Image: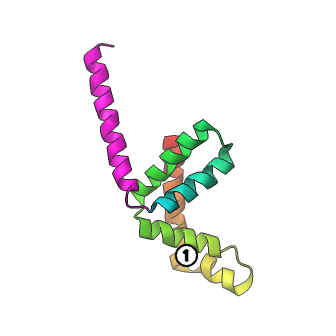
Amino acid sequence: MRTGNLDVIAFLAALTCAATASAAGSYPTVAIVDYVYGCMKANGDTRAALESCSCSIDVIASILPYERYEAAATFRSLGFETGERGALFRQTAPAKSAIAELRRAQAEAEVRCF
């Protein structure tokens, strides 16, 4: 490859990273860190896991606005409750829709980052 081609590739990579970073910028830092921490625990606590998990939350942030991510994560978390309380967060149409949207974003992140 010629040097000019490498410059173009580097420029395009920088633009891609900047676009992804600005999407993640709408997520609070604590939400990003919480996601990456949990993801790393599930994927081996390695440098490669850090990079893949960081990429993953960036992809999710580029697909879902934070408010929808937060709603889906809340539905998913509270859905683990037993009995009627948990059923409200698992079986209602808004809960199912929000969780399905989050799963689609996570699947896209899996394809792009892992």
Q: Position of residue 59 (x, y in %)?
A: 44, 50
Q: Extreme bottom residue here? A: 84
Q: Quadrant of residue 62?
A: bottom left
Q: Is residue 28 above or below residue 95?
A: above
Q: Measuring 28% from the left and 23% from the top, which residue is drawn there?
A: 7
Q: Is residue 112 in sight in this rendering?
A: yes
- The residue beneath circle 1 is 95
100 vs 45, left or right, is left
Q: Quadrant of the N terminus?
A: top left
Q: From this viewpoint, which residue is outermost toward the top?
A: 2
Q: Position of residue 24 (x, y in %)?
A: 40, 55
Nearer-the-camera pick, 92 or 35? 35
Colour approach in the figure: rainbow
Vertical relation: 99 (above or below) 106: below
Dominant SS of magenta comes to: helix
Seen in the picture, residue 95 relative to 17 is either above or below; the reply is below
Say few, some or many: other residues with alpha carbon within 10 Å of mark 1 (under 14 / 14 to 19 / 20 or more).
many
Residue numbers of the magenta segment: 1-27
In front of the other: 69 or 104: 69
